[in-house]
Image (spheres, rainbow, N blue to C red):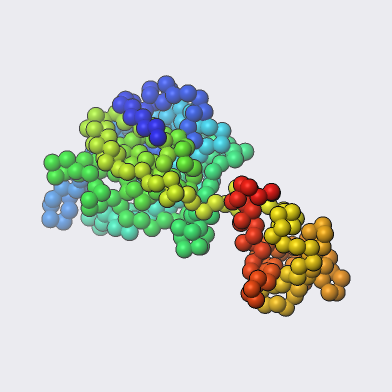
Amino acid sequence: MSQEYILGECIKEMAKLKDQSVDMIFADPPYNLQLSKPLLRPDQTDVKGVRHDWDKFNSFEAYDTFTLNWLKEARRVLKKDGTIWVIGSYHNIFRVGSVIQNLNFWILNDIIWNKSNPMPNFKGNRFTNAHETIIWASHSQKSKYTFNYKAMKVLNDDKQMRSDWTLPICSGKERIKNIGKTLHPTQKPESLLHRIILSSTNKGDLILDPFFGTGSTGAVAKKLGRNFIGIEQNKEYMRFAKKRIKSIEQLKDEDLNITKNLKSETKVPFGSLLDNGMLKIGTKLHDINKKHKATIRADGSLLTDNEMEGSIHKVGAKLQGFTACNGWDYWHYEENGELVSINKLREKVRYNKNIIH
């Protein structure tokens, strides 16, 4: 797998990358928190917030210019069917979102990352800031982008995954420290990157992170068999990122396979089951309760006892009084006294290269 580490300022370094060369971008840009005073806990100890030079801008206008420039480069290097993810807090995400739309990206979702263990509001003068927003956008409205819907559904106990994700902030052993102190104040948890990368990329895709930090994107990308480019201007962050990623083992190829979307799977006509001798003309098909039955004819159509005829889908719908039906799920054949779904035969055709489709 390709792993490229680039030390330098993101806009200058992105300008060196080829047009339409990356499949996905994950960006965690400076939040522009505008912190002017130290933040203290009730016991007067210091809160390690973001007070680094890389998060300081002279004005909103300066931040907007910076945002416009890096997003222009991001748009240039992103493939036409690629997507970009940008995470931020209430301090910056609305300004970033405006620029994203003005550059003609097409927003697909705004993901709410609900932090299961957020930092409390020590002053008690506003609600606890317990979430961050992630904008997910395609290159354009016409982009044929990757979304591994079925895999996300399986990950969510076979329920459609929603746009609000409850995940913990980075803590414990995952939090990178240097001489006992937190190295990067906004290190993102690998669990968050796992969902992002798994949902919108495929094995072998190239991911760009222009604000690489301590390498969470690279760590998960390597684990999941994706290539990556990480751009970071802080030498210390980059040094720890390389060390961190070097220690990670890529998962085995068989473990990287995910549940495919139905649209991405090879289409198998019902007639191919006859062509391959899996079912014979004249075979009786039944619904799971044996309430209805139909006979397979020479052209692969079905005929019921009351002269209802058509495809496996059309006849199944008519028998149930529905406008549509998935015949692959509805119809079964008898084998050794048991009913077996014809969908199992379709799967054999789909995954056996020696069988005629």
Considering every residue shown, the one lying at the far right of the view is: 307
Relative height, residue 106 to residue 157 (above, below): above
Q: Is residue 33 left or right of residue 316?
A: left
Residue 25, x across and y down, in percent: 44, 37
Relative height, residue 43 to residue 330 (above, below): above
Report the residue at 68% width, 72% height from top.
334
The total number of labels drawn is: 0
Residue 309, x across and y down, in percent: 83, 65
Residue 277 shows in this picture = yes
Towards the viewer: 175 or 123 = 175
Q: Is residue 180 left or right of residue 256?
A: left
Residue 86 shows in this picture = no
Report the residue at 79% width, 59% height from top.
300
* Quadrant placement of the N terminus: top left
Which quarter of the figure has residue 115?
bottom left
Which quarter of the figure has residue 206?
top left
Relative height, residue 209 to residue 278 (above, below): above
Report the residue at 36% width, 56% height from top.
167
Residue 288, x across and y down, in percent: 66, 74
Residue 72, x across and y down, in percent: 47, 28
Report the residue at 27% width, 41% height from top.
247
Q: Is residue 321 left or right of residue 70?
A: right
